[in-house]
């Protein structure tokens, strides 16, 4: 079953259960998935990652503005979206990918960060946030 079909069936199930918050979140996600399928060549996981990131950024902005209740709603939507994404890499798995990329590229200083990041991000394939990868690469290169 395609991801878009899974989201659609989950939305129908949430409607039957009367879970308005979940229905609203899934409608937005479904809309973005359908728009992407129609207008661009982005894959479904890229759309979901983008939408999850938007929710987390909005939650952070709400928290900064002193609106904890709105931030919690955004975080709940981000968690709902995350359930459709592949599992995140563990710290150990990410560290191993970074070590292998540093070794493969022959990186020795922070100047080589771009090459290492390029290789690691290709292998990570969205299973780790870029900020997290960047921090691990900096640490490995002694920056």
Image (tube, rainbow, N blue to C red):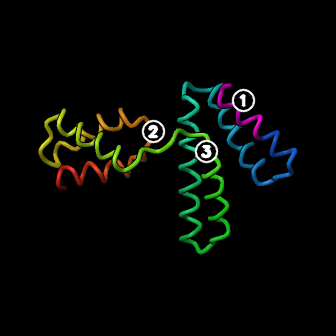
The residue positioned 87% from the left and 44% from the top of the image is 16
Disc 2: which residue:
126
Q: Residue lying at the far front in this picture: please name it.
A: 92
Callout 2 crowding tier (Cα within 10 Å): few <14, some 14–19, many ≥20: some
The residue positioned 58% from the left and 61% from the top of the image is 59
Q: Residue 58 in the image: state x and y as whole percent.
A: 58, 58
> Of marks 3 and 2, which one's residue comes earlier in the chain?
3
**Mark 3–mark 1 distance (CA, rounded to whole Å):** 15 Å
Check residue 121 for magenta coloring: no
What span is in magenta? 1-10
Disc 1: which residue:
5
For the N terminus, the quadrant is top right
**Mark 3–mark 2 distance (CA, rounded to whole Å):** 14 Å
Callout 1 crowding tier (Cα within 10 Å): few <14, some 14–19, many ≥20: few
For the C terminus, the quadrant is bottom left
Q: Residue lying at the far bottom in this picture: please name it.
A: 66
Left or right placement of residue 39 versus residue 13 in this view? left
Q: Residue 121 in the image: state x and y as whole percent.
A: 35, 37
Q: Nearer the viewer, mark 3 or mark 2?
A: 3
- Tell which of 104 and 131 is nearer to you: 104
Disc 3: which residue:
83
């Amino acid at each position: 079953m395609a991801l878009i079909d899974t989201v659609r069936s989950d939305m129908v199930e949430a409607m039957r259960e009367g879970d308005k918050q979940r229905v609203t979140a899934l409608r937005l996600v479904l809309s973005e998935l359908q728009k992407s399928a129609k207008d661009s060549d982005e894959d479904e996981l890229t759309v979901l990652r983008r939408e999850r990131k938007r929710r987390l950024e909005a939650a952070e902005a709400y928290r900064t503005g002193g609106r904890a209740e709105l931030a919690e709603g955004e975080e709940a939507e981000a968690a709902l979206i995350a359930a459709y994404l592949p599992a995140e890499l563990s710290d150990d798995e990410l560290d191993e990918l970074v070590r292998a990329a540093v070794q493969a590229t022959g990186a020795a200083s922070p100047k080589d960060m771009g090459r290492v990041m390029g290789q690691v991000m290709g292998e990570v394939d969205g299973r780790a946030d870029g900020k997290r990868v960047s921090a691990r690469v900096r640490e490995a290169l002694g920056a």
